Image: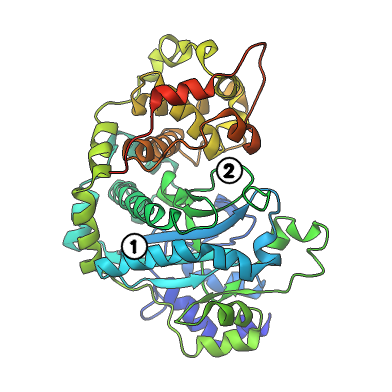
Amino acid sequence: MSDLYSDAFVRHRLAEYVGEESNWQPTAAFVSQSDGCAYQRHNLKPARHLRWFLDRDLDIARSLADSDSLLLHLDVEYVNFDSPAEALMSPQRAFELQDPVVKAIQSLLDSWGIKPLHVLTGQGHHFVWRISRQSITAAKITALCPAPELLDGCVARAPTDDPVFSRDNQSSFSALSLLMEYIAHRARNMAAVLSALPVEITAVHVGPWLTRQRELVSIDISEYGDPLHTRMVRMPFTRYLKPWATGMTRLPGVGEALKPLTTIPVAGMELADALILRHSEEAVMSLAREVSTAIPCQEEGTARLLEDYLNSPLRSFHGDFYSCQHDPRENWPRTYGRTPVEALPNCVRHIALFPNDWLLKPAGIQLVTRCLLAEGWHARHIAGFIRSKFEDPAYHWGVDWRDYDPAIRADFYVRLFAGQYATGLDGLLDMNCVSTQAKGFCFQLGDGACGLESVRDRLRPRAVA
């Protein structure tokens, strides 16, 4: 075992983050290995077994499911589709490029009176806080659950019948996704005019920027697009092993240049200092003596956030989105299955005919959503159409739909992109053939022009609400 994980103060901070208050009774539903390991049932252990991961010097994540609290978590990161290791090779630049988004989030949270725990990861930032499940605010949030008809599927997919994965808790998590989407909207709107890179909600493919690379800053709330039991968040004071687990270190020039690093709480440090400190185990252990990682309870601030959301244009869109339901599965051959894809632009037609894995990429869903909106589709039925693709085994999806829920996944991403259009946040600037080709989503099918620009002209940008 390394000095880091054997340090008593580091262990105490890890215990704080999984919700231990006394007698080693953590409130987190489980802990798991983080990097390179998406949700895997065999890779989960009760939080009281945290030592198992420490003994093996692994990276570690805790579940978003918690027996006492609703956890709210924002993830900001630099993404480069052409140079995946860029944030690790040029961290000062990558983190400075995130600064407008980080400042926007901090300003928003401060305006509501929310003081989150701020954590620095290998490629970005986490902001996390909680509210008690027993609070009035939690009850008001849970009452907003957008699609209760889908909750039974989430409960059935949970790894155990532990009450932490109950229908009520999944209902709360589904409702939280609405609030997190609202924060992401506000932050993107504030930061976009100040950012040197495109700012996107989730890692949507973009075209080459001034550097001729496809790079962006992502406000990643994708964890709220899956069932509660499948999602976890990296723990501060644990190793950041993603470059090694995902093969980044095998890229030319990366392995020999990359130094080990640790995820740390920012604790008011200057960015340059934090980027240096995270490489020193001795400095990290010293930081653990001073800085708590207990996730702060922020009920009053979250109540103000909730009030703002309820009076927002996004809330109005959400009401319209869930005003109808997907077509019943037995009707799909006569409804979604008869979608006239030959009338769609080549890029969208290709995605509809060959959805694996184009519909697993946010940019693919964005293209389909925009084009079907232009055809007059209701956004919830666009989600139903995509769900029908996800549930078709003929496409041999790599996603294990026994754990993830295709209906919730489709709803989340279509809602995300349709909501940005409906509120004016999506100006459709990249809805053209040149940008689509630069993203890698252009497909030539037969003769003739694609026609993406004419679809955009029918859709027309809306003013920011």
**Residue sitting at 41 percent across and 34 percent down?**
414
For the residue marked with disc 2, what is the amino acid? Val
Judged left or right of residue 435, residue 376 is left
Q: Which residue is denoted by mark 2 in the rendering?
A: 206
**Residue sitting at 34 percent across and 54 percent down?**
186
Asked which secondary structure carries label 2, the reply is loop
**Residue sitting at 57 percent across and 50 percent down?**
40
Asked which secondary structure carries label 1, the reply is loop
Q: Position of residue 406 (x, y in %)?
A: 46, 34
**Mark toward the viewer: 1 or 2:** 2
For the residue marked with disc 1, what is the amino acid? Ser
Q: Is residue 145 at least partly visible in the picture?
A: no
Judged left or right of residue 378, residue 456 is right
Depth check: 195 or 272 in front? Answer: 195
Q: Position of residue 123 (x, y in %)?
A: 59, 63
Q: Which residue is denoted by mark 1 in the rendering?
A: 67
Colour style of the rendered protein structure: rainbow
